[in-house]
Amino acid sequence: MRHASITFDRAFTIGDTDPRLFGAFVEHLGRCVYGGIYEPGHPTADKRGFRKDVLELVKELGPTIMRYPGGNFVSGYNWEDGVGPIKDRPARLDLAWFTTEPNSFGTNEFVDWCRAAKIEPMLAVNLGTRDGDAARNLVEYCNHPGGSAWSDLRIRHGWKKPHDIKFWCLGNEVDGPWQMEHKTATEYGRVAYEAAKMMRWIDPSIELAACGSSGRNMPTYGRWEDEVLEHTFDQVEFISLHTYFNNYAGDTKAFLASPDLMDQFIEEVVAISDAVAARRRSDKRIMLSFDEWNVWYRTRRVRADRVKEGWPVAPPILEEIYSMEDALVFGGACISLLNHADRVKTACLAQLVNVIAPIMTETGGPAWRQTIFWPFAQMSRLGRGTVLKAIVKSESYEASYFDPRGKQDLYYPIEAPYLKASVVSDDKGVSLFLLNRDLEGSLDVTVNARGFGKLKVAEATELRHSDLKAINSKKEPLKVKPATLKGVSTKSDEITLALQPASWNVIRLES
């Protein structure tokens, strides 16, 4: 049995978690929209076609902001195709996922769905095949109250009040050659600046995110952020980051260590952003929007898992089935996001339903929670507050994480503590998020909580399974689920607990 300790003080903080840190992502990809959140004729569908069983699970999951409509999809999307009478909307061939997009669900339907789910909408504009003119027209359509061509069109379409969308993404992954109208950093920086300028002229209250690297393994990583921010610094509040964790190598220890690379990614982008500010002698600080993150690899590299031939509508693609092992890595990523709450102000789990998602559905049938559902729901519910500077003392292990990059595969050496932790306080108490990465042994943990007085255990759960490959399914929707964590004891300002091997643990302490 290994031993570890956590020490924190109420007075020593990292930063407050922004409500947008607990976001997610809906793209016109596979069955995320059609058969996911939207399925007219489903037994639970309301009059707008929204699946109420999915809505209930979304409310339980607790996302606060939702990115839409992509993703790769947005780089070829004409937003005008998705508004107006559904019978008049054109079907288009989508070159992102080689499907046919019927456009029966578009911007207005998405905003209505967000209102039903009590979630803030986040829109991305097409800066692939289009430019700033289409982007500023969309802002006018969504946010202008009336008396102009595009705002009056919204009113004629049945939405009298403006949508008042505040958060906008300036394109998606434009650094990637897989993107429609892929651009260099200079090309993208110029069009993003001009789009941002015009969008702000329509609505000065909006917030904007420029595209950062689509992965830390990109050959242009680092230089891309620097050049893009050199152009857009004065017009944006955020720069985006994307990452997906994999276990292509079949190395569980390295897989569990991989969220530590997320910490490095964040800290590097912060440093680059602040260097751009320093060159300007500016006290402005660019915040980070980690608007795509998840575990994804099984349905990623083989074309047959990403593309169904014949241009189908909403085919079942990228439907990753998540295991207990994946949930542990996912939980580690949640901890990384929390521990950078001072600069990561927005984050979006990619995606919400069916497509690399915490929620799965059967078209015409039930919906259920995947294993990764649990860490996100707990983080969203208990992670709102002030993240504390926790001193974690734990034994470590060495790992080498494999991350493919075309012809030049990358291996990242990691020295990973067996215990990865985050601590979030609020007016009533403190929440501990603890990941035990020891595959074989329990971990005895001593927690020293200073400045809180006498604390009592209000809630303590563990997520674990004897089989790391265990999954939830239609037949066994709750095979992997949280259980009570036993053996937590409190004495004065010291708490002791024992974490089972390979487990995600959440402890809520209140005075």
Image (cartoon, rainbow, N blue to C red):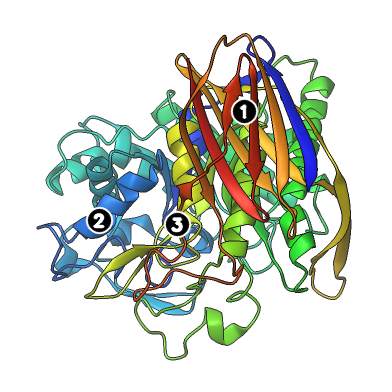
Q: Residue at 67%, 32% (x, y): give it.
A: 339
Count neighbours of disc 1 (C-alpha within 10 A) and say few if under 14, some if 14 to 19, many if 20 or more: many
Residue toward you, 170 or 469: 469
Tell me if residue 33 comes above or below residue 153 in the rendering: below
Location of residue 338 in the rendering, given as x and y in whole percent from the top left corner: 61, 34
Residue 136 is situated, as x and y percent measured from the top left of the image, at 42, 40
Residue at 80% from the left image edge and 68% from the top image edge: 405
Foreground: disc 2 or disc 1? 1
Q: Could you tell me how far apart the alpha carbons at marks 2 and 3 are, in whole angstroms?
A: 40 Å
How far from the left and from the top, in percent, is residue 306?
54, 79
Residue 407 location in percent, x, y? 85, 76
Horizontal arrangement in the rendering, residue 422 relative to residue 67 (left or right) = right
Q: Identify which amino acid the numbered label 1 is placed on.
A: Val
User: For the residues carrying marks 2 and 3, which lies nearer the camera in this image?
Assistant: 3
Q: Between tags 3 and 1, which lies in front?
A: 3
First in sequence, mark 2 or 3: give its number: 2
Mark 3 lies on residue: 481
Q: Secondary structure at mark 3?
A: loop
The amino acid beneath tag 3 is: Lys
- Residue type at mark 2 is Val
Residue 173 in sight from this viewpoint = no
* Label 3 vs 1, first from the N-terminus: 1
| Residue at position x 78%, y 58% in the image | 218
Residue at 21 percent of width and 32 percent of height:
146
Residue 423 is tagged as 1
The residue that label 2 is drawn on is: 83
Q: Are marks 2 and 3 in contact (CB under 8 Å)?
A: no
Tell me if I can see residue 435 in this picture.
yes
